Image: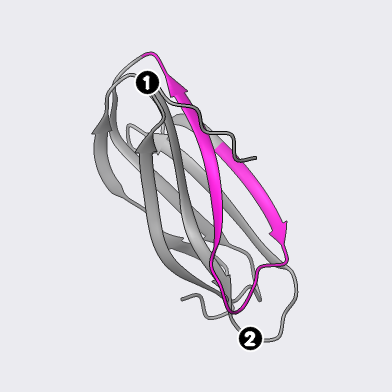
Amino acid sequence: MSDGRAGFLSFGPYISLDPGEYVVGFYLRRVGIQKLASFEVDAVAAGGKALAAERYCQADLFDDVSSLIFLRISTEDRLDGFEVRLQVQQETQIELQSLVIFSTNNRRWSAR
């Protein structure tokens, strides 16, 4: 859970991803009375040197149910040291409930 200070709330899991299509993201919920949560989600490999995807969000998250904030990733090469990072801005208070990484190879996934 973030405490209102800016910085990384989560990073990892430092795994290898085979070539393919993926959805990665975090289930988050708002904590406290703030309405807009400001944060950035990115997916990187090779110690942060290879950016696979990134997304800056300013969102009104629910406080009673988690929201999935996700990125779509397509890679033709194996990604070693793969991690998904969540960086929060000053005064953002959110609770990270889980990280998800799943392959969408050979299936349709139409969430936007």
Q: Which residues are magenta?
A: 54-76
* For marks 2 and 1 on the same chain, the one whose residue lies earlier in the sequence: 1
Q: Vertical placement of 15 versus 62: above or below? A: above
Please state the horizontal and vertical placement of residue 100, each as a whole percent of the image.
38, 50
Can I make out residue 5 in this image?
A: no
Residue farthest along the front direction in this orientation: 107
Tag 1: residue type?
A: Gly
- Apparent side of residue 11 relative to residue 68 in the rendered image (left or right): left
Q: Vertical placement of 101 versus 91: above or below? A: above
Q: Residues within 10 Å of mark 1 (few under 14, many from 20)?
A: some
Colour scheme of the rendered structure: one colour
Taking the spot 68% from the left edge, 53% from the top edge, the residue there is: 57
Kindly identify which numbered label has been placed on residue 4. none
Which element carries disc 1, helix, strand or loop? strand
The reply to whether the magenta stretch includes residue 56 is yes
Instruction: Tell whether label 1 touches label 2 (CB within 8 Å).
Output: no
Which residue is tagged 1?
A: 20
Taking the spot 46% from the left edge, 37% from the top edge, the residue there is: 23
Which element carries disc 2, helix, strand or loop? loop
Please state the horizontal and vertical placement of residue 66, each as a whole percent of the image.
53, 67
Can I make out residue 59 in this image?
A: yes
- Apparent side of residue 92 relative to residue 23 in the rendered image (left or right): right
Kindly identify which numbered label has been placed on residue 32. 2
